[in-house]
Image (cartoon, rainbow, N blue to C red):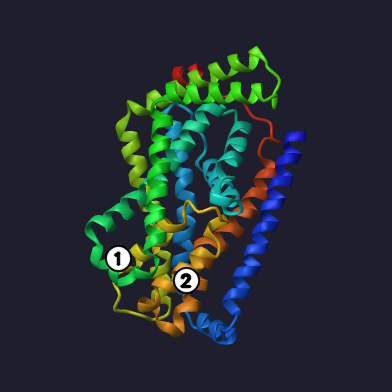
Amino acid sequence: MGKENCMVRKYVGSILFLCLLIGITIYVLIENNDMRAVAAAMARAEHIWILAGILAALFFVAAEGSIICYLLRAIGRKMPLLKCISWSFIGFFFSGITPSATGGQPAQLYYMKKEKISLPVSTVILMIVTITYKAVLVVVGLGLVLFGQGFLHRYLTEILPVFYLGIGLNVFCVTAMLILVFHPALARTILVLGLKIVEKLHLMKRKESRLKKLEASMEVYQNTAAYLGTHKMVLVNVLAITFAQRFALFAATWFVYHAFHLSGISFITIVLLQAVISVSVDMLPLPGGMGISETLFLKIFPPVFGSTLLLPAMVLSRGLGYYGELLVSAVFTIVAQLTIGNTKREKRGGTTYDRVL
């Protein structure tokens, strides 16, 4: 109960910080702007295209749930798809209210544990989800650096330092996580060393049972990582789904573009510009890239939307790609908190591999 109260206080603080950032962002946006004109422009947007953008944004979150479900089934754990999708929305909510999306996976681990999925297994699954998620950004970023210099200098001159920083941080993160997932011996060494340091600093009491429990968990972690490492097509399929997932969200801005009855700019140009924003802000320590994402949009999209529709387009695009998803995810999280783990479950049979885990 104490740990749960601590977690609740932490996330309440994150929500308050998020509200502060939203307030500052709104103030900056409405200052020196005619919000009546912005609202009028948004009201003229064609609803069918906005609906398509909403569906693309919801697919983005739900696709992660399908990946989690697919990976669990690959190791012999059958979970309902809707349950996995609910974990995805929970993860998006907590990622969206915490800096650098640090709260998403701990929350998902918590709810997955309630469904009797061991921590080492869920950790490997979610690390693979994160690796492929960021790998898409790395591929897009490096692809533009190597083959899209004309594109960069046409649209991104003002934000190139932020873009390059985003690529570097994502490359570092993906590399580090790949080492931890597929070199579990190193992961074990780091965890054991960390545990010993914490005990030496008297932040935790020394217990032999704690080390034994860690060793047992790392064995499960190693088995899971090894199993997935020898099933390359599983990882290839996950990467393919992740590409579709990420580009669905990037395409939301293209739907907004058509909602304003605009034409002349290609689908790939708009999608890549939106991808650049994600690459740039993904690792920055602000919930959802709050404030920075809006600023980058206003910097790089004027050639697409023009001065009149730029702010309305940004509001709709961010509304679809972040704020709307955050509200839907909040509903899923509330429902999950009320229902997950409180219903009686039938004992599940498992595969041989499942019983080993």
Give x and y (percent) for residue 163: 39, 59
Left or right, 321 with reference to 25: left
Task: Residue at 31% x, 39% y: name it.
Answer: 236
Q: Secondary structure at mark 1?
A: helix
* Residue 120 in the image: above or below residue 262: above
Label 1, label 2: how far apart the Cα atoms are: 28 Å
Q: Quadrant of residue 338?
A: top right
Q: Nearer the viewer, mark 1 or mark 2?
A: 1
The tag on residue 88 is none
Residue 269 in view here: yes
Task: Residue at 73% x, 35% y: name it.
Answer: 3
Task: Residue at 41% x, 26% y: name it.
Answer: 225
Give x and y (percent) for residue 195: 59, 23
The tag on residue 152 is 1
Task: Residue at 42% x, 68% y: name it.
Answer: 253
Left or right, 301 with reference to 287: left
- Nearest the viewer among 161 and 276 is 161
**Amino acid found under the numbered disc labelled 2:** Ile
Disc 1 or 2, which lies upstream in sequence? 2
Give x and y (percent) for residue 167: 37, 52
- Nearest the viewer among 194 and 129 is 194
Give x and y (percent) for residue 153: 29, 69
Left or right, 20 with reference to 262: right
Q: Quadrant of residue 32?
A: bottom right
Q: Which residue is mark 2?
A: 50
- Nearest the viewer among 269 and 33 is 33
